[in-house]
Image: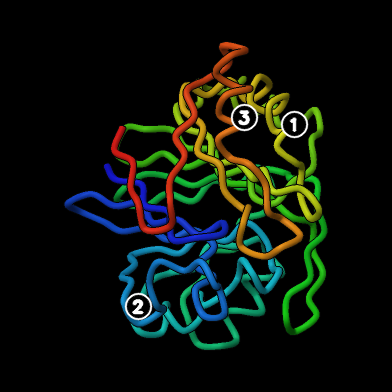
Amino acid sequence: MNIRWLGHAAFELSDDSATVLIDPFLTGNPKAAATADEVNADAILLTHGHADHIGDAVAIAKRTGASVQAITEIAGEIGEEGVSVIDTNFGGTAEYAWGTARLVPAFHTSTTPKGTVTPAGGLVIEFGGTRIYHLGDTALFSDLALPGRRGKIDIAIMPIGGHYTMDRFDAVVATQMVGADIVIPCHYDTFPPIETDAQAFKADVEHAGYAQVVVLAPGESYTP
């Protein structure tokens, strides 16, 4: 299984059988590692409805035939565009041929470009025998510890940029709470307000002994 950072909070999970996109904000993303026309998808998973997360989901789904999993109200909005949707709410798990994806709470706001307001979420994804927790956009809050109570988190994908999400200092605390073996930082350096020092985050986490931090450049991949 391969995890590729597409820039900002967008990731591609892939193996020989399937490709899954998370929050595919590519058009208008100055750090995008691919265009919306270049990526493939069997499924698209959304944490919430902000434009920098819902991104190119509809266009990619129409081109590839991928389903889009999102919180119920966002799925309803996207479904009106003529794409296949899976409308899980918090705690809901969707089953796929390649694994599962469960929507869990984040602490953040969420309004789609069309004005649909919902809570924001994160995703716990089982793919290729690996459990991945994409925290979505979130502040530090105690519920971040809960997904790991159900089963050990192998890899956490975590925002560190501050301003709109928790910063790199709160993310160190979140790393301890989540309990993953590997942490991949995201949602930083895309725009000036969220510029931060990912290597300093890595040093702080690893000095504390909480996890191994894998800092990727947009377009780079990590294979567990």
The image's mark for residue 65 is: 2
How busy is the neighbourhood of tag 3: few (under 14 within 10 Å), some, or many (20 plus)?
A: many
User: Could you tell me which secondary element the residue under label 2 belongs to?
Assistant: loop
The disc labelled 1 sits on which kind of residue? Phe
Quarter of the C terminus within the rendering: top left
- Colour approach in the figure: rainbow
Instruction: Tell me the quarter of the picture where residue 25 sits.
Output: bottom right
The image's mark for residue 200 is: none
How busy is the neighbourhood of tag 2: few (under 14 within 10 Å), some, or many (20 plus)?
A: some
Residue at 60% in and 86% down = 80
Above or below, comparing residue 190 to residue 223 in the picture:
below
Q: In the orientation shown, which residue stands out farthest toward the bottom?
A: 81
Left or right? Give the position of 64 relative to 152. Answer: left
Q: Nearer the viewer, mark 1 or mark 2?
A: 1
Is 83 or 181 nearer to us in this picture? Answer: 181
Residue on which the image places disc 1:
169
Residue at 45% in and 55% down = 11
Distance CA(mark 3)–CA(mark 1): 21 Å
